Amino acid sequence: MPAENPYADGAAFMEGRYMPISEARIPITDWGFTRSDVTYDVVHVWQGRFFRLEDHLDRFERSAAGLRLNLPHSRQSMREILGECVRLTGLRDAYVEMGCTRGVPPPGTRDPRELRNRYFAFARPFIWIATEEQRKRGLHLVISQVQRIPPESVDPTIKNFHWGDLMRGLYEAYDRGGETAVLVDGSGNVTEGPGFNIFVVKDGQVCTPARGVLEGITRMTVLELCAECDLPLQLGEVSAQAVRSADEVFLSSTAGGVLPVTKVDGKALGTGEPGPVTNRLRDLYWSKKEAGWHGTPVQ
């Protein structure tokens, strides 16, 4: 009988070696933990292929540069590390994360320039942002009263762990009978939610917020699909009222692709079922991806 794979639940890379994910640790004095001084990125593997790996590496490198973090590995080395994490697990569908923390300060200093930045990576079974039942019928979205951290304070285009406001919004959604939340800015326009970008459809036009949001890789994919389908697209301000009165609303996320929303603040949108634009984009997203679109095989 073959031995059980010790990496079946996930494989991690830290400090130059691979290990089962259950053994991965960072010191409690690492500023990535104590100060949220860290950036990360998440790419997924579907049917044995990374989806848009180079785009994720591009964003990760930009994020590290934006926080003045020095990545200790070359781009090619990071490709190999991510691939090896997946290979060790034996997974065909995987959630793969890489990150860089500020590191542990030497004794007696608080100067961030003196810290050795720390790279980590891990792969684990694919994680969905919504259940199968929610993906079929559509999510119940709540427009939270919590204001998103303004981009003047924390740049949302740099992927970060500043999720305090997002978690407040998520619990508010639960308290109001919803399943997830989107936060607003200081002017009452929607921004983003915990792990997703938002799109609204009105009279055939697709709109999504242009400011105060992470420039998601799946968001970018949806923009490309809209162009391919000749769907009118607008990037700009999207008011909370525009979401409530939309014909359709959908979310985009690495952890689920195109996800329909069929209820906002307790009220059904349209027919109360995923709309035609949402279904068209969702079906196209999955069919193209399963055909190998933007795919990089795991060696």
Image (tube, rainbow, N blue to C red):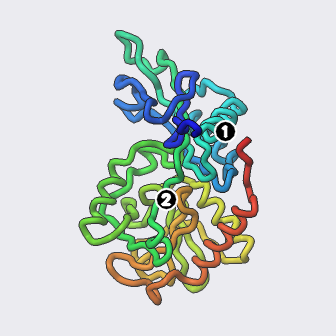
Q: CA distance from mark 1 to mark 2?
A: 21 Å
Instruction: Tell me the quadrant of the picture where the N terminus can be found.
Output: top right
Residue drawn 45% across and 64% down? 130
The spot of residue 149 in percent (x, y) is 38, 50
Circle 2 is placed at which residue position? 128
The spot of residue 41 in percent (x, y) is 55, 43
Among the two numbered marks 1 and 2 on one chain, the one whose residue lies closer to the N terminus: 1
Farthest left residue in view: 175
Identified by mark 1, the residue type is: Gly
Farthest top residue in view: 108
Helix, strand or loop for disc 2: loop
Instruction: Give the camera-side residue of 202 and 176.
Output: 176
Instruction: Give the camera-side residue of 269 and 110.
Output: 269
Query: Can you tell which mark lies on residue 245?
Result: none
Is 107 located above or below residue 298 in the figure? above
User: Would residue 157 appear left or right of 185 to someone viewing this image?
Assistant: right
Instruction: Give the camera-side residue of 84 and 192.
Output: 84
User: Would residue 85 appear left or right of 132 to someone viewing this image?
Assistant: right
Circle 1 is placed at which residue position? 83
Residue drawn 56% across and 28% down? 18
